């Protein structure tokens, strides 16, 4: 009996050990994947200052970003490095976007595997993107794969592609832009595709291309990746964005409607997600803006189970990181190109100090949360007026209004010296055409000449500065730069007046819900609404009146 008991016990131990061995084997054979991600880099090659709670921090810079990437690669050699778009436009480096394509070339040097296009890659229209892609290919440098799944090249009214779009389409083919890319890392077959969202598309009104439905294209590409390419994991580089209002959050809607997406890297809205959003089985990550953070995401899969999130962090890119020497050299090379090909035309230097600010302006993201006057907007709008007056000289026609949309201010000035590089940016004029769509047709802006003629050729309305002898176009950034230089100097450096530290009721927002206040002083749109309401009420009164008369007649007949 004892012998039998010992035999049973031995078999049990062997079975337990066997199961344990199988379990451990399964754990060891997990499919794992490390993903590094960025978005909305906006040409921020160099470190920059931000203000948080009154403290100035030195953040960002591609050389530091590369050090962080290299550190992660030491731990996970077969990781994936990807970007969700808007890698261009925002600093002086954009001035050589079309001629030299520094963005794609430096991202290739940093070993980015796959990137997608954002709306700002179309800021210089189809021609600008075409030339940038051509310059990248011509350089012979290593380049990242570009995926763009919902870019369409529409025919004109005669059923043909315009020459501009024909050229862009050819540059897509020459570069190798595709709907999706298939890669393998650590034994995992990965499908990556890219999308442009509705809001992002509306921010590229001069792109000349069309962006077809993101959800339908996602379904199409995911089906190909799953059924034909047989990938293990599907990643979407999404330039759609997330919003606080989930009903309008395009990436969350996409994840709900295309649940086969395993990982979604979100760009466009500059959202910094300290924790990922999980919709069903889709993991949504977003690293913020300008290379301030590097997203690091680890996922794994055991046998036939679903992919699971193991870890997610946003690694700060700051002074704690050393600058990668190779990337630093490349940045300096592109900086020299900017000086030679662009700034020399204006007689300015990249690091030239324009002025000193005795205070920090309120950071733009904080201003953008509410409809209100912006101190930096006041400074910029005054700069526009100053530049026009300077350029026109004795022919100057006084400017009545200068407008700076808060959404086009992508940075802020912090206390201290302000350089030419700090003053660069803005893209207001090209957004005029989307006002009608954004206001659901209630508003429209029709620029006109001083004699009341609607402007159709904007190129003909560009203000040029002939006083310097160079006949330069008056750029928005140049207007700000020259205005900063015009202030009174202290020890040889212009000082921004304290006037700009506060608002001055230039923009008054009336949020009253008082009915009498809402009905008083109506504009043309309000008058039109009032007329429609009055006509509707009159129509209803007439209809009710007719019904009452009919009933009265029927009663008389019955009587």
Image (spheres, grey):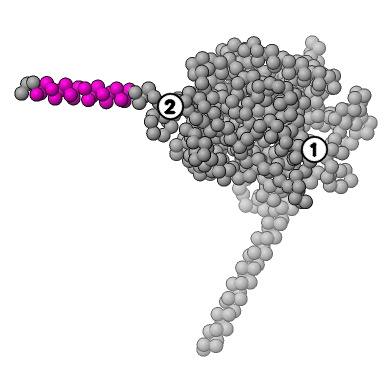
* Left or right, 490 with reference to 268: right
**Camera sees residue 451:** yes
* Left or right, 553 with reference to 26: right
Pointer 1: what residue? 401
| Mark 2 Cα-neighbour bin, 10 Å: few <14, some 14–19, many ≥20 | some
> In the image, is residue 319 above or below residue 399?
above
Q: Of circles 1 and 2, which is in front?
A: 2
Between 174 and 299, the residue placed more toward the observer is 174
Spatial CA span between label 1 and label 2: 61 Å
Q: Position of residue 79 (x, y in %)?
A: 52, 22
> In the image, is residue 513 above or below residue 67?
below
Residue at image point 81% right, 18% down: 340
Pointer 2: what residue? 31
Q: Position of residue 529 (x, y in %)?
A: 68, 56
| Mark 1 Cα-neighbour bin, 10 Å: few <14, some 14–19, many ≥20 | few
Instruction: Assign a secondary structure to mark 2.
Output: strand
Question: Which residues make up the magenta segment?
Answer: 4-24
Q: Quadrant of residue 330?
A: top right
* Left or right, 169 with reference to 59: right
What secondary structure prevails in the magenta region?
A: helix
Q: Position of residue 349 (x, y in %)?
A: 79, 16
Between 495 and 280, the residue placed more toward the observer is 280
- On whether residue 5 falls in the magenta region, the answer is yes
Q: Quadrant of residue 294?
A: top right
């Amino acid at each position: 009996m004892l012998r039998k008991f010992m035999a049973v016990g031995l078999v049990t131990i062997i079975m337990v050990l066997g199961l344990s061995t199988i379990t451990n084997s399964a754990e060891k054979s997990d499919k794992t994947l490390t993903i590094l991600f960025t978005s909305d880099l906006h040409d921020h090659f160099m470190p920059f200052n931000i203000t948080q709670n009154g403290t100035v921090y030195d953040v960002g810079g591609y050389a530091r970003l590369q050090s962080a990437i290299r550190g992660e690669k030491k731990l996970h050699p077969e990781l994936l490095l990807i970007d969700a778009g808007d890698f261009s436009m925002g600093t002086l480096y954009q001035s050589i976007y079309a001629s030299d394509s520094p963005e794609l070339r430096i991202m290739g040097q940093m070993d980015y595997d796959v990137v997608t296009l954002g709306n700002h890659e179309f800021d210089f229209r189809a021609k600008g993107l075409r030339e940038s892609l051509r310059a990248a290919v011509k350089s012979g440098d290593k380049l990242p794969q570009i995926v763009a799944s919902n870019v369409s090249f529409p025919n004109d009214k005669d059923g043909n592609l315009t020459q501009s779009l024909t050229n862009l389409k050819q540059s897509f083919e020459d570069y190798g832009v595709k709907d999706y890319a298939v890669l393998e890392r650590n034994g995992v077959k990965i499908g990556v595709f890219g999308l442009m969202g509705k809001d992002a598309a509306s921010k590229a009104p001069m792109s000349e291309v069309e962006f077809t439905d993101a959800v339908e294209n996602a379904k199409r590409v995911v089906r190909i990746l799953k059924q034909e390419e047989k990938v293990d994991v599907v990643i979407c580089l999404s330039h759609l964005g997330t919003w606080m209002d989930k009903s309008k959050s395009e990436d969350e809607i996409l994840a709900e409607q295309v649940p086969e997406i395993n990982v979604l890297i979100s760009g466009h809205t500059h959202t910094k997600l300290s924790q990922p959003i999980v919709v069903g089985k889709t993991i949504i990550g977003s690293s913020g803006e300008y290379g301030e953070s590097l997203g690091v995401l680890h996922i794994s899969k055991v046998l036939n189970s679903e992919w699971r999130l193991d870890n997610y962090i946003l690694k700060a890119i700051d002074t704690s990181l050393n600058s990668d020497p190779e990337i630093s050299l490349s940045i300096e090379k592109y900086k020299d190109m900017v000086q030679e090909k662009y700034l020399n035309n204006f007689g300015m230097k990249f690091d030239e100090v324009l002025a000193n600010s005795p205070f920090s302006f309120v950071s733009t993201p904080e201003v953008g949360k509410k409809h209100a006057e912006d101190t930096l907007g006041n400074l910029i709008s005054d700069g526009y007026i100053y530049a026009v007056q300077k350029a026109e000289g004795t022919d100057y026609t006084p400017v009545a209004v200068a407008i700076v949309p808060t959404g086009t201010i992508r940075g802020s000035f912090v206390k201290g010296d302000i350089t030419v590089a700090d003053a660069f940016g803005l893209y207001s004029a090209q957004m005029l055409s989307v006002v009608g769509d954004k206001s659901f047709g209630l508003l429209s802006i029709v620029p006109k000449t001083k004699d009341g003629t609607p402007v159709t050729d904007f190129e003909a309305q560009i203000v040029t500065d002939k006083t310097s002898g160079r006949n330069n176009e008056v750029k928005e950034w140049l207007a700000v730069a020259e205005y900063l230089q015009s202030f009174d100097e202290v020890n040889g450096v212009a000082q921004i007046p304290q006037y700009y530290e506060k608002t001055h009721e230039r923009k008054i927002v009336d949020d009253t819900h008082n009915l009498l206040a809402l009905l008083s002083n109506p504009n043309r749109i309000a008058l039109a609404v009032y007329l429609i309401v009055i006509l509707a009420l009159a129509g209803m009164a007439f209809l009710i009146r007719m019904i009452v008369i009919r009933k009265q007649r029927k009663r008389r007949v019955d009587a």
